[in-house]
Amino acid sequence: MTRQPFIARNPSLLIFLACLALFTLLVTVFSEAMGTGLISTSFVKTLGKTLCLCLVAIAMDLVWGYAGILSLGHFAFFGLGGYMIGMWLMYARTRDIVVTSMANAEIPPTDAEVISGIGNQIFGVVGSSDFPLIWAFSHSLTLQLILVVAVPGLLALVFGWLAFRSRVTGVYLSILTQAMTLALALYLFQNDSGLRGNNGLSGLQNLPGADAIPQATISLWFLWASALALALGYGFATWVVSGKFGSVLRGIRDDEARVRFLGYSVEGYKLFIFTVTAIIAAIAGALYYPQAGIINPAEIAPIASIYLAVWVAIGGRGRLYGAVIGAAFVSLVSTWFTGGQVPSIPLGFYTVDWVDWWLVLLGLSFVLVTLFAPKGIGGLFDLITDRQSPMRHGQDLGPDQGALQEKEADS
Amino acid sequence: MKTLLEVSGVSVSFDGFKAINNLSFQIGKAEMRAIIGPNGAGKTTFMDIITGKTRADEGRVLWGDKSVSLLKMSEAQIARAGIGRKFQRPTVFEDQTVFANLLLALKKDRGPFSVLFYRQNAADTEKVAALAAEIGLTDHLARKSGELSHGQKQWLEIGMLLAQDPQLLLVDEPAAGMTPEEREHTTAILVEAAKTRAVVVVEHDMEFVRRLNCKVTVLHEGSVLAEGGLDHVTSNQDVIDVYLGR
Amino acid sequence: MRVFLLALAAILSLAPSLQAQSGSGNTPVQDLLQVHRALIEKGSRKSIAPAIDAIATSGLPAAQTVLQTWQSKDMWQREEDGLFFRAEEIAKKTYRLYDFDSGDAVGDYDKDALDQLKPNSGVRAMIGTALVVFQLSDPDPARRRDALDALQRDAEASHLAPLRASLEGETDPEIKARKEQLATLLTLRFGADDTARIAAIESISTDISLDARAALNMLLTTSREIAQGPVPQGVNVAAILTPGEDMPEAEAYAMLADKGLAPPRLSPDDIRNTLAAHIDGGKVGGVPLAALNTDAARATAYAALVEAGLAPAQPTEAAIKEALAAHTIYDAYAEPSAAVTAAAEDALAAIKTRVGLNQMLDLALDGISLASIFFLAAIGLAITFGVMGVINMAHGEFIMMGAYTGYVVQQLIPNYTVSILVALPLAFAVTFAAGVAMERLVIRWLYNRPLETLLATFGISIALQQIAKNIFGTQARPLTSPGWLDGAWVMNDVVSISYIRIAIFVLALTFLALFLFIMKRTRLGLETRAVTQNPRMAASMGINPDRVNMLTFGLGSGIAGIAGVAIGLFAKVTSELGSDYIVQSFMTVVVGGVGNIWGTLAGAAMIGFLQKGIEWMNPSNTLAAQTYMIIFIIIFIQFRPRGIIALKGRAAGD
């Protein structure tokens, strides 16, 4: 049991990073910005967004696959991250527009006039013109970037502290996180929430001061940033789960009472991983929404967080590359199906139009995966590496609800 | 002998049923104690109260030189204060290797951050190896503990308990499901451990208790019925009536 | 009052001339019409009042007929002598005239020989008001009610006397009560003296009807006035407002400026516009344009303009204070009598207290009705989740299936009552079958894996939702309730509850009873409890756990289906119907305490009442109410993690 170097202990990390680098390189070479245009700018954006979804899936896998907490709230943190960066993007961009339009006035505008002009532009749709308190930092990129991490992190910290302290576990915790997500979404839907109600924040694809740069180039920047974030996130997650900390996390997943009797404060660990993954999710969201261009409260409805769990489950939970594969596969296939590019199937009496039936297919295939292939797509790699499940006669690996199932574990 | 743990006047009830009724109990710093009693006598609940799993309705549980009350502490705090517990059914982390299990139990700072930045060093590896040798699992260190036999899991759990280096060991039926040879070894480990710390063994098996050769406490309906040497309590008429007589 | 006196004077002054003309025959109405001929022919709303009043108050038997005829544009004037008649068209361009006084036909005339009187809508409305007085004693009760409605809309002092007079002969007790109320309301506004009015006010101080409150509020109408120096004598002052305390100083000063009592305070916009108007060679008041991007620089430039006499000076703070000190701002009652307004204030305060109490009652009824909806939605979950511990995310979709079953049945059976009666058992059957199928195919493989159950049933949920969307489309489908469920039970103007909510409440109670009966009194209930508490022991006692689980799950799902029909009756049926309720339903069960139907009831009651309570505090925003509700629940679970009614001890699954 001598200690090997970090990379040697985690060979999948190198393979993953190589694949990611190759992918980014290929997309860059074939993008419109580089001239060939084999991959359209909108598809580059889709791919960049997919990378962000992979990152939030890693966060989900950490919290669910490794710590056994089925959080149905991580997409809320993702959305909050998007809102935080969106506030700066919208403010700075509107400021540029307002300053330009006021430049023609005979008397140069005062700062107060500029700010009230921005307020009119942004909040006109909800019948207001004053900046709510939560926009106090929106003029500063630095402060708003801090908020990207701080706001979701703080929310996760407070919510997690309340939930874990009262020892809410298993499905109860899932329902509670879902309730939190619903509360947040409903709150943001209000016009007086200060974030433009159901209009959300829009025009986020326009980087302030970068009007001269074509979207093709900007989309590449974001792709690179997303790839870098994913690489860092994957590396960080690998580091967390491969050491003793990961050992404690898996212990909590399978049998948290036992971990407690070993003297570990389970609540502290859960809170730590819940908050850290919330921050990862928020960073992913902050990279996602500038590529999507718009964010509104519907994005963080509870269903989105359940989809996140679905991705991780389809990819295979408890293995980081599984989460990445699941998120990439399901979201890309979903784009493909709902984009209307899949040919319909004529049955004679009825034509199956995949735009309408894709969700049915997804739902049912998800049931099948849960029932018959708990390892998900990631399980296919076990065929190559010849890993096998233990023979435990159907016994789970621990008494807790989040514990690994026989078929998920390997011997 | 100085008192390590003092339980006095503790009661707890579940939906009107008094599981523990005005129980008092004391144990010294390096002492072996066996607790026997029929089913439902409150042995497991007694351990639950000490380890913080169940809250007592009334009474006091004082710990150590400073006489700290355990009643206000969480399970993890109590474990860190130096009370280790082995469960009736072997509970180890089945998805993790024997090595990881032992490393997890090794006495170290338990805070999330120090665990996160923990780097395995040679001294710890040696300690784990020594423990593995003591419990006879040296050859199995790299195996997943879920694959171990029932007896081996019991060993591993005792090993984890020793790795915690507690001042008080609470051991629930350590010999259940073991072969006679394994029992012998278990006895040896426990007797050895009791030289430097307190050990409380809950056991059904009289033969095993006899071999421990220690003071015995008999529980019945949530309170202490008798206390003393094994021969002393087995000759107690009350004990014979409620326990041995049937 | 003044109008009434005028009319009286008119009659009195006419009396001699009436007698003088009566020699030509007994035609008093015609004579009266002739007196006011000029006004009637002119037909102007502004000047017609004396004519209408004269006719209405003449006391002549034909007066009502005249007014009605006039109003319905059937009154014609014979050109040759200017006399007025009622005309009927008997042939094209030929009219038969009838005398008002006698009612006899006087002959047929060509249209050219006649002039039709065409009162405009304003005049017709005035005639209508005058007619009300007659209608108050009309033999037809419906017309009396119409008259009272008209009076209530548009009351005048002159109505009071005829209204009181008509009280005597009123036979219908309901109308009589209305008349009495109206008489009181008119008295308190138009009564002869303060004593009568105050008596009237006091008599309605226990009346919470909207009419009473409107009448009192009308008495208490105030207008905001400014006086130089103290408040003038003779004004009935409601309140004197101190700037800075009762109203912001800026607002008070703006009022002064509006009335021209002080120079207006200049806004930053005003200053900027003035500066822009005086740009002189790239400078304003000596300050270069580019530097004018701060308020301080603008102030300097503006001061220079003031100096040069080009702009009005901004009033100083001291000047503003002085101006405010020199004036008094007060609210004055339109009603001059202080005694009356004081009585009205007291009465209104008393009524408000009563209204508040009634509102509490109404809120409680609302809360009960919302609670029964939550209970209905959650009771199926109380079985599948509460008793069996199976978390079924598709439960909401079962509710939706029930609602759509009701919709389909209504398409087939047009009679709403029959279709609801058919839909209830059918919805149960459909969702029972769906529940059993789901239990057999999916859930039983995942019994000890609740998190996987959650996700798998979520998969089913999105599939079912999409299938419903594909079949029924995205638009909302109506599920119409039978006619006897329309309307509401109205206790008074404040408290009312619709029959459909009462029906849902009754349904919720029925289900509670049904649940208790099944769980406590039937074999299935016993077996269910046995299987959930200890499946192995139950199996060894000859209970087939598979069968019991299947039936219990089917039962829970079936109840969801029935709940769906009930919810569909007041909510729009869409494919998202279920997902709107699912989180609240789970919350209801969790908050109430899992495994206990009384807990679910308590949970539903708590959530229902709280949500209504929060909505009451912030009525404009139901979204906010839901948000705060959920936050409250999250905090509540801190203190009672096992819900309101918790199972204790080891049974709770320690």
Image (spheres, coloured by chain):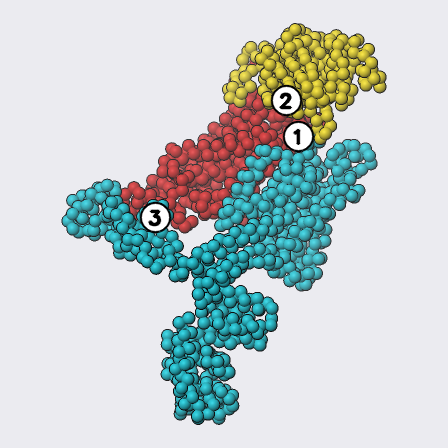
Colour assigned to chain B in the rendering is yellow
Residue type indicated by callout 1: Gln
Question: Is label 2 or label 1 in front?
Answer: 2
Residue C331 is at least partly visible in this image: yes
Q: Are marks 2 and 1 in contact (CB under 8 Å)?
A: no
Mark 2 falls within which chain?
A: B
Question: Is label 1 or label 3 in front?
Answer: 3
Residue type indicated by callout 3: Thr
Q: Residue at x 28, y 48 (%)?
A: C325
Q: Position of residue C102 (x, y in %)?
A: 51, 89
Tags 2 and 3 both on a single chain: no
Q: C456 or C90: nearer the eye?
A: C90
Q: A307 or C110: nearer the eye?
A: C110
Return the residue at label 2: B52
Q: Is residue A108 rendered to the left or right of residue A338?
A: left
Question: Is label 2 or label 3 in front?
Answer: 3
SS class of the residue under badge 1?
loop
Estimate how packed mark 2 is, as few (under 14), some (14 to 19) or many (20 or more) residues with alpha carbons within 10 Å. Answer: many
Colour assigned to chain A in the rendering is red
The alpha-carbon separation of the residues under discs 2 and 3 comes to 65 Å
Q: Residue at x 52, y 24 (%)?
A: A239
Mark 3 falls within which chain?
A: C
Q: Is residue C426 rendered to the left or right of residue C112?
A: right
The alpha-carbon separation of the residues under discs 1 and 3 comes to 75 Å
